[in-house]
Image (cartoon, rainbow, N blue to C red):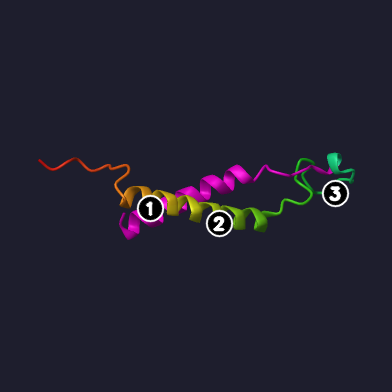
Amino acid sequence: MGITSGIVVYVIAWWLIFFMALPIGVRPPHEAGEAVEAGHEPGAPVKPRIWMKALAATILAGILWLIMFFVLEADIISFRTPKA
């Protein structure tokens, strides 16, 4: 895996994990027992914890990238055509 493909794989993994983590643990104000302030979206989460989810996505994408790197470099799975 080259540097460019490694970066692309990491970025794609990071965004996928980040978007999967976004809905985890969010509650709108009516479920949290709080009043919606004027001008705010009623469905907006009370505490979205974006930084925690970004950190989790960074760590999980790094682990996933390391696993993928090991599998590709050890030729456990190869996308190259065999040389004749």
Contact? badges 3 and 1 (CB < 8 Å):
no
In this rendered view, identify the residue nearer to me: 71 or 13.
Answer: 71
Secondary structure at badge 1 equals: helix
Contact? badges 2 and 1 (CB < 8 Å):
no
Amino acid bearing label 3: Ala
Q: Is residue 83 above or below residue 63?
A: above
Q: Where does the N terminus fall, quadrant-wise?
A: bottom left
Q: Is residue 76 above or below residue 62?
A: above
Q: Which residues are magenta?
A: 1-29
Comparing labels 3 and 2, the label whose residue is closer to the camera:
2
Q: Is residue 54 above or below residue 28?
A: below
- Which comes sooner in the sequence, label 3 or label 1? 3
Q: Position of residue 78 (x, y in %)?
A: 28, 43
* Residue position marked by numbered label 2 in the rendering: 59
Secondary structure at badge 2 equals: helix
Q: CA distance from mark 3 to mark 1?
A: 50 Å
Q: Where does the C terminus fall, quadrant-wise?
A: top left
In this rendered view, identify the residue nearer to me: 42 or 74.
Answer: 74
- The disc at residue 37 is none
* Residue position marked by numbered label 3 in the rendering: 38
Q: Is residue 11 magenta?
A: yes
Mark 3 crowd level (few <14, some 14–19, many ≥20, 10 Å Cα) = few
* Residue position marked by numbered label 1 in the rendering: 69
Amino acid bearing label 1: Phe
- Which comes sooner in the sequence, label 3 or label 2? 3
